[in-house]
Amino acid sequence: MTAADTLIYLDHAATTPMRREAVEVMLPFLTERFANPSGSHRFARSVRQVVDEARDVVAEAVGCQPGEVVFTGCGTESDNAAIMGVLQRSGGIGVCAAAEHHAVLHPIEHSGGRVVPVDSAALIDLDLLAAALDETVSVVSVMAVNNEVGSITPIGDVEAVVRRHAPNALLHTDAVQAPCWLDLRGITSHVDLLALSAHKFGGPKGTGVLVVRQGTSLEPLLQGGGQERDRRSGTHNVAGIVAMAEALRLTDIERVADTSESKGFATDWSTTCSPNSTTSSRPSIDRSRWPVRRTSASPASRVRRCSISSMKPAFVHLLHLHVRAGRWSRHTFSQRWASTSGTRSVRFG
């Protein structure tokens, strides 16, 4: 019995394995369909059409217009493009929460911005956020789901504070951890800028999205060929874009069922950890745009999809599962409480 047979991967908050469907749809664009979509010949036009179709898929899942979707190289680039793009275009300063990912925290700090403390659940203190806002603030960034402890920001409440105390500021959210657990449409409606990363929901590494709502003006982080309507120059990673769109489409379809399963996993060991457990039926998958083969998930793969981000706010359950004689059993269970008041971020060693 190998280590792969006995150890279960639970660090999906860091990265996820690629979905088989995402791998399948990207393979043709790594082999015979290799044309540059920025070209003017027939081969390029056919590939550019695929990029546009992928943009439509992402826009549907996120809840925005296709023209508001900007393809990037990763979540870090999306965060930096949003924050530095606003600061370089509009001036002013940025404000963020102390528990933000470093892709947000460092640009804010290095540009002389303000960092607002968080509470014991790693959620931004709204009263302190209000106190940090004034007419000099041009961008505010608050993550949708914390990447360390999984706490969910009430982004609508954050929007209300920002619109009231800094009406000219743009609101950005790092939603990298959100797609598997939250309907992105309910987040996008409250913000001006939203960042995603494909490898957090079964897509490939090296591909991301920045949603730039209509009327939002950014200075491009990258200058060059003018791709993405001059908002992000650079040759499109067509294979990565297509795979990301497929992964996000399936994640959006399966989110309700998967969230229900992971809640049961956290609260009912005897049922969810059994190889004979049953789950609610999944919605049927529309294959009209991305014709790929879908296989049913085994109990093992359902457990593997459980992310630390699915656990309750303010603590992380550290779970070590192993398989003995074909049965799931709990190896150890411990609970750690996070206290982030006055600190920059939450870390568990």
Image (cartoon, helix red, strand yellow):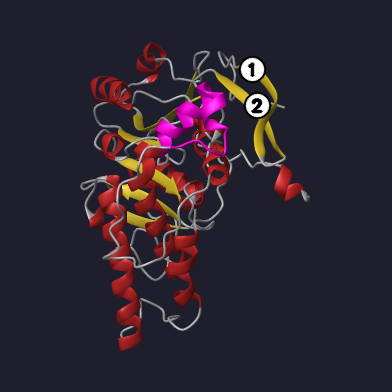
Residue 175 x/y as whole percent: 41, 39
Q: Nearer the viewer, residue 119 or 139?
A: 119
Q: Nearer the viewer, residue 196 or 246?
A: 246
Please determine whether, in this image, residue 224 is positioned above or below residue 87.
Answer: below
Question: Can residue 135 be spotted in the picture?
Answer: yes
Residue 282 x/y as whole percent: 35, 45
Residues shaded magenta: 258-278
Q: Is residue 273 left or right of residue 70?
A: right
Answer yes or no: do the residues labelled 2 and 1 have beta carbons within 8 Å?
A: yes
| Residue occupied by mark 2 | 318
Question: Can residue 218 be spotted in the picture?
Answer: no
Which label number is shown at residue 335? 1
Q: CA distance from mark 2 to mark 1?
A: 7 Å
Q: Nearer the viewer, residue 154 or 306?
A: 306
- Crowd rating for badge 2 (residues with CA inside 10 Å; few <14, some 14–19, many 20+): some
Magenta span dominant secondary structure: helix
Q: Residue at x 55, y 46 (%)?
A: 301
Which label number is shown at residue 216? none
